[in-house]
């Protein structure tokens, strides 16, 4: 019987330590969560400090005038010829037949270069 009593005593000591470890770990986690929530609640004051710095009047420089030149795209016959040749070459490669007088280019519009640069 002495081994059973020793086992029960040892088991209760281990459980007591485990309980203290659990309580200590949970306490640390809750303290950390409270500190994080406090830091988050203090973030609204950071914007007020930035507004005070931005409130100082800075000398304003006159904005430069931009001259926008519109390109005349009404006489782009060379571009039309290249597009027509490319379409005919593609159709010929794919096995289709397109007569030279059967294609009509209705309009040519330039695309933003930024879209092509992002591709």
Image (spheres, grey):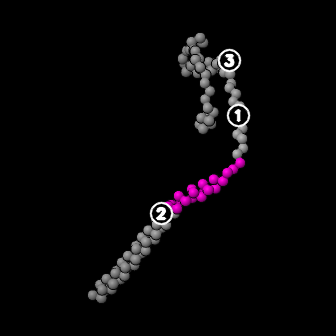
- Structural distance between the alpha carbons of marks 1 and 3: 26 Å
First reached walking from the N terminus: tag 2 or tag 1:
2
Give coordinates of residue 25: x percent, y percent.
Answer: 43, 71
Q: Is residue 98 left or right of residue 27?
A: right
41 or 74: nearer the eye?
A: 41
- Is the residue marked by circle 3 packed among few (<14), some (14-19), or many (20+) residues within 10 Å? few
First reached walking from the N terminus: tag 1 or tag 3:
1
> In front of the other: label 1 or label 3?
1
> In front of the other: label 2 or label 1?
1
77 relative to 32, above or below: above
Place residue 19 in its image quadrant: bottom left
Picture residue at 44% right of the left edge, 68% below the top: 30
5 relative to 52, above or below: below
Assign a secondary structure to mark 1.
loop
Picture residue at 58% right of the left edge, 15% below the top: 104
Which of the numbered marks, if any, corresponds to residue 84?
none
Secondary structure mostly seen in the magenta stretch: helix
Which of the numbered marks, if any, corresponds to residue 75?
3
Which of the numbered marks, if any, corresponds to residue 37?
2
């Amino acid at each position: 019987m002495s081994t059973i009593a020793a086992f029960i005593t040892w088991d209760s000591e281990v459980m007591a330590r485990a309980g203290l470890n659990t309580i200590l770990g949970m306490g640390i986690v809750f303290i950390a969560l409270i500190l994080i929530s406090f830091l988050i609640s203090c973030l609204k004051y950071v914007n007020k400090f930035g507004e005070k710095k931005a409130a100082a009047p800075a000398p304003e420089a006159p904005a430069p005038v931009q001259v926008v030149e519109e390109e005349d795209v009404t006489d782009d016959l060379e571009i039309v010829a290249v597009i027509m040749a490319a379409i005919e070459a593609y159709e010929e490669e794919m096995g289709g037949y397109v007569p030279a007088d059967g294609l009509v280019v209705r309009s040519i519009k330039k695309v933003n270069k930024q879209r092509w640069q992002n591709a």
